[in-house]
């Protein structure tokens, strides 16, 4: 799995943003901002678990140093256009994986 993916832009969907806010209260007020911060800092990418809605995970810190995990997938219509399916504050195993990738 490459450490980098070609992500040119993000596709935002009100349904997915609502899902993030409803199921993950830590993202409720600013899911879009946190995704962009992780993307602009030092994210690492890995394949998501088989059979899930998203193909990859993006794991990394936001501008304040909090670690996040976002499950993402590329839009079928436009290479380089990605969308967030879900996300959460990174768990310890995800943080450990991230640190081993440096």
Image (tube, rainbow, N blue to C red):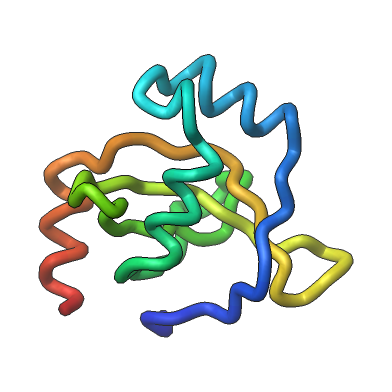
Identify whether 100 is placed above or below 67.
Answer: below
Which residue is drawn at the image coordinates 66% and 52% (left, top)?
83
Q: Is residue 51 left or right of residue 2?
A: right
Q: Position of residue 30 (x, y in %)?
A: 48, 32
Which residue is drawn at the image coordinates 82% and 64% (left, top)?
76
Q: Position of residue 49 (x, y in %)?
A: 45, 52
Which residue is drawn at the image coordinates 73% and 53% (left, top)?
11
Q: Position of residue 87 (x, y in %)?
A: 44, 39
Q: Is residue 72 left or right of residue 11?
A: left
Identify whether 54 is placed above or below 43.
Answer: above
Q: Position of residue 19 (x, y in %)?
A: 60, 24
Which residue is drawn at the image coordinates 53% and 28% (left, top)?
20
Determine the image quadrant of residue 79: bottom right
Identify whether 102 is placed above or below 75.
Answer: below
Determine the image quadrant of residue 8: bottom right
Q: Is residue 15 left or right of residue 68?
A: right
Identify whether 84 is placed above or below 47.
Answer: above
* 56 or 41: nearer the viewer: 41
């Amino acid at each position: 799995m490459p450490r980098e993916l070609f992500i040119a832009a993000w596709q935002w969907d009100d349904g997915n943003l609502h899902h993030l806010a409803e199921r993950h209260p830590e993202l409720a007020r600013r899911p879009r901002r946190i995704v962009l911060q992780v993307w602009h800092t030092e994210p690492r990418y890995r394949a998501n678990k088989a059979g899930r809605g998203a193909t990859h995970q993006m794991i990394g810190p936001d501008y304040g140093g909090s670690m996040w995990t976002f499950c993402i997938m590329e839009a079928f219509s436009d290479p380089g256009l990605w969308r967030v399916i879900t996300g959460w504050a990174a768990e310890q195993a995800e943080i450990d994986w991230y640190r081993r990738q440096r």
